Amino acid sequence: MDVGNVLVWAVWFVAAFACLGSGIAVVSFSNPFYSALALIGNLASLAVLYLLLSAEFVAAAQVLVYAGAVMVMFLFVVAYLGGRADAPWAGGASWQQVAALSAAGALLIEVFLAVGLEASDRLSEEPPVEAFFGGPHEIGRLFLTDHLLAFEITSIVLLVAAVGGVILGSHTRRFEPGVDR
Amino acid sequence: MIQTPSIDWVALSPTLATLAAAGLALLLAVLVPRSVRRPVAAFVVGVGFLVAGSLAAYVYWKSPEAQSLVGEAATRDRLGSLAQILIAGAGFLTVLVAYSDRPRQEHVGEYFALLATAAGGMMFFVSADSLMTLFLGLEWFSISLYILCAIDVDLETSLESGLKYLIVGSFGSAILLFGFALVFGATGELQLAAIGEAGAALDDDPMMVVALAMVLTGLGFKASAAPFHMWTPDVYEGAPTPVTAFMSAATKVAALVVALRLLTSAFPAHDDLWTAAVAALAVASLAIGNLAALVQRDVKRMLAYSSVSHAGFMLIPIAAANELGGKALLYYLIPYGAASLGAFAVVAARERELRAPVTLDNLGAMGWERPFLGFALALFAFSFVGLPPGGLFTGKLYAFSAAVDAGWTWLVIVGVVATAVSVYYYLSIIRALYLRSEAEVQLAPAGGAPPRELLLSLAVAAAIAVVIGSFVFVEPLIDLAGDAVESLGTLASE
């Protein structure tokens, strides 16, 4: 086994266990602020796994969009609401726990099936993935050619959402008793 | 050098016109003085809708053959253009209805701008030809509508309506997106016709079947077909009434036209499955919509259930999946959209007058107090039943005959029974309008003469004209619908 391979294995090992550990941390912290911080770690280690799969663009987007923008928003909301959230296992309807457990069980079975099929060479065929698949160059080309319209429409959707955020967030709370609409 | 796709600006022009109107309304709302904000915003968006409708009519006239736009992301055909004309018309009438609905100056520019973006999103949605643009179009108009529903944030009902619509609507969108992902996974294609070709070899592929079920569910949410209609009464009740009027007319057009396009172009090989599923949705909508409407006292809720039942009627021709069915659906949407918009407009007027939710009780004797609006509501209720002076009579006739041609005779029987049930609650509206003893009428304090609402009355008059006009001019309208179905090119004639 050469040095490069050892390095890949080492990075994979660290990233995978960081991913698992921070994932467990997200659901077990009782303070939502720590959960959000752990989620950043989870997303960052996931980005490392993407890098190992040579999906550089997805890794970068993962860090920028999720670990960056989305998580900052999460933290803002947590800070805004204060640490008033319930502890994770306190109360909670039992059917939710049952549903969560069965969903997690289904995912686990899926993972075992996929790994088992791959190990016994029974996965039907290799996916037709070219070398440059998922690279920034290829994604940029698609945005300007095949998915030009979709790319532009996304900006409109975001604009509408921003206008909506301003409307719903900026209203002055004036309760006028007895006056409806 | 990247070869960028050529862009057919003419075909995109109706959507762009509404977007331009929205942008202009937003900017002008900031620039003009507060006192003229409302007329300026309403005028800009109203003109935007008229321009968009005219451009859509031009595109309809100029494109008898379907053409692919911007790298197969959208299509230019008469089906899309006809739906765009209907949406622009609904949007224009909504501007008239909404004009005096916003006495406060808060967010008035944004209100009309969002109306324009919602309509623009629908116009894009009905012409989208790939799964990606379809989903983006759906989100575009849905987000606009979520905000419009919740725009009166100070009112608990409006906030509740917006939040419910957001949660349930996002759930529907997510299921639709999941379905799209499975379709892409099974076929490797995004463009509808290409999916249809690739899917022909996959006619018993479980992934395609699950995908089809999820797509139907997602579209069912948007079209408010039972059993995915749960949000409809609450959202219709709580949203500002002009928004409800717009949603009931335009969202139906968008969702059902897209259902027709998507099912017939992307799933032709699975038509035995989806016709049966659509027929089941139609039966559920007819049963639940009509039975639940029987016990409603709130007029907006009753009309909401009525819209569920009409979704059922309009799913019948889709289940028929033949050329006559396509024509029947497109024709049906014209008088239905007008009648629904008109009925909610009258409710909006009554609501403003009473400053309270309109129920069957406080609708009392409106027919005598405000003869024109009262008569209009009675006429709309009468035509909802499907009785001759309204175009819905012809629409139901066509829908039923399409179903008979396709061998769905039992579906027609369900439809006729549902119509018979619906007579009860539609007539209870007419009864409340005219036939109440004076002791029974609880007159609400109105405070002087009712406001004169010229623009709203104009919108109601236009709706009456369309409802009756579509009955008188059946032949040319059916021809228009027939050309639209022909340019879609996926429905076989007999």
Image: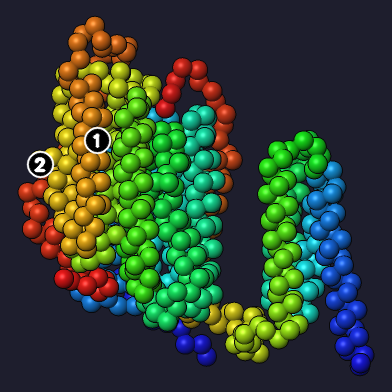
The label nearer to you, 1 versus 2, is 1
Judging from the image, what secondary structure is the residue with disc 2 in? loop
* Residue A140 in view of the camera: yes
From the image, tell me which residue sits under label 1: B422
- Residue A24 picture location, percent across and down: 84, 56
Residue B307 locus on image (x, y percent):
32, 42
Chain ID of residue with mark 2: B
Give the answer, above or below, for where B441 lies relative to B323. above
- Pointer 1 and pointer 2: residues touching (CB < 8 Å)? no
Q: State the residue at coordinates (33%, 35%).
A: B291
Q: Residue A63, position in %: x, y?
A: 74, 67
Q: Is residue B103 left or right of residue A71?
A: left
Horizontal arrangement in the rendering, residue B93 relative to residue A136 (left or right): left
Q: Residue at image x 68%, y 56%? A: A103
Asked where in the image residue B129 lies, by quadrant, the reply is bottom left
Q: Check disc 2 and give the amino acid type.
A: Pro
Q: Is residue B449 left or right of residue A130?
A: left
How far apart marks 1 and 2 lie (CA) works out to 15 Å
Which residue position is annotated with label 2? Answer: B388
The crowd level at tag 1 (other Cα within 10 Å; few <14, some 14-19, many 20+) is many
Badge 2: how crowded within 10 Å, few (<14), some, or many (20+)? Answer: some
Three-letter residue code for mark 1: Ser
The chain letter for the residue carrying disc 1 is B
**Do dots 1 and 2 share one subunit?**
yes
- Along the viewing direction, whichever of B262 and B470 lies nearer the viewer: B262
Element marked by disc 1 = helix
Give me the residue at 28% from left, 59% from top: B318
Q: Nearer the viewer, residue A95 or A126?
A: A95
Q: Is residue B441 above or below residue A179?
A: above
The residue drawn where x is 8% and y is 53% is B473
